[in-house]
Amino acid sequence: MSKPVKQNPPIANRILAALPIKEYQRLLPKLEQTNLIFAENIYKLGDIIRYVYFPTSGVVSLLARGEEGEMLEIGVVGNEGVVGLPVFLGVETSGNHAIVQGDGTALRIKTEAFLKECGRNGSLPKLLQRYTHALLMQVSQTVLCTRLHLIEARLICLLLMMHDRMKTDEFKITQEFLSKMLGVRREAVSKSAANLQQRKLIAYSRGIVSIINRMALEAAACKCYKILKEEYANLQG
């Protein structure tokens, strides 16, 4: 359920937070708060993008779909970014699936109002250009990781990226969802998660993941995670 933003809340989305205060205040009446519910489809492949979302908490997964209906995660978006970026690039429809991977909230704006603000040639287009670069880096690095690294390393990278965005050591994610994110069978996810539990890096029970040893988890991650972490740190800088 969505509701208008009636007062200036803490600016949790980093793109909105980076706007000059006058630009943000001009945008604020056009924003409405909405809940991000686990496994909810924000867009499906081919959907017209009627709203652009600025997550303030939670995680949205971007998924590519194959000919047989199989899905593979190509990127994740949290409060550092925006969902609905194609409209900024002149595309009206979604080229992939956008599914909520972690419960949270977002501020959304109608596409027409979003494009009007972008047309003012203020700070928003410049911020979106930088974010587009960061997201493209994430997509390309995810493709490389899928091609070169074992399932367990990819699972660690995904869990760390979720942990960064969820801001909590415990979050909901099912094996079925993980298998879609990684493009592998549930049995492979179960085996990798069990290995991480035995090493006391995570706990996993009934669809709930708990990060037990963040430092050791980062040490076990492939270099892809470090590259992506540095890229988003540069974006924030």
Image (cartoon, rainbow, N blue to C red):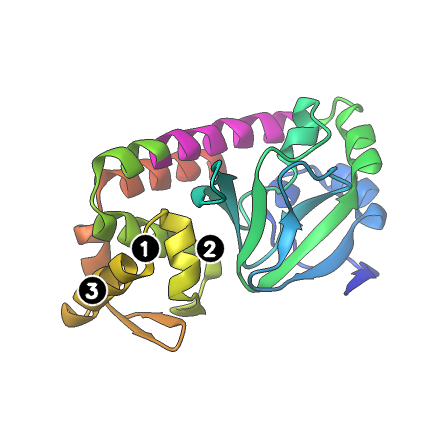
The earlier-in-sequence mark between 1 and 2 is 2
**Residue at point 65% right, 50% down?**
42
Relative depth, front residue between 148 and 16: 148
Question: Can see residue 123?
Answer: no
* Kind of residue indicated by mark 2: Arg
- Separation (CA) of disc 3 from disc 2: 20 Å
Q: Nearer the viewer, mark 1 or mark 2?
A: 1
Which residue bears the numbered disc 1?
A: 185
Amino acid bearing label 1: Arg
Residue 152 in view here? yes
Q: Name the residue under label 2.
A: 165
Residue at the farthest front position: 68
- Residue 138 against residue 190 in the figure, above or below: above
Q: Which quarter of the figure has residue 215?
A: bottom left
How many neighbours does mark 3 have within 10 angstroms: few (below 14), some (14-19), or many (20 or more)? some
Which residue carries the number 3 mark?
196
Residue 186 position within the rendered picture, expressed as x and y whole percent measured from the top left: 33, 60
Instruction: Classify mark 3: helix, strand or loop.
Output: helix
- Give the CA separation, mark 1 to mark 2: 25 Å
Magenta-highlighted stretch: main secondary structure?
Answer: helix
Disc 1 secondary structure class? loop
Q: Does the magenta stretch include residue 132?
A: yes
Q: Which of marks 3 and 2 is nearer the N terminus?
A: 2
Q: Residue furthest bottom?
A: 206
Residue 43 sits above or below residue 86 on the image: below
Q: What residue range appears in magenta?
A: 123-142
What amino acid type is highlighted by mark number 3?
Answer: Leu
Q: Which residue is drawn at 73% across and 29% down?
A: 92
Where disc 2 sits, the SS reads: helix
Foreground mark, 1 or 3, reads: 1
Question: In the image, residue 14 lies at what x, y percent?
Answer: 58, 45
Report the Cα–Cα distance between label 1 and label 3: 17 Å
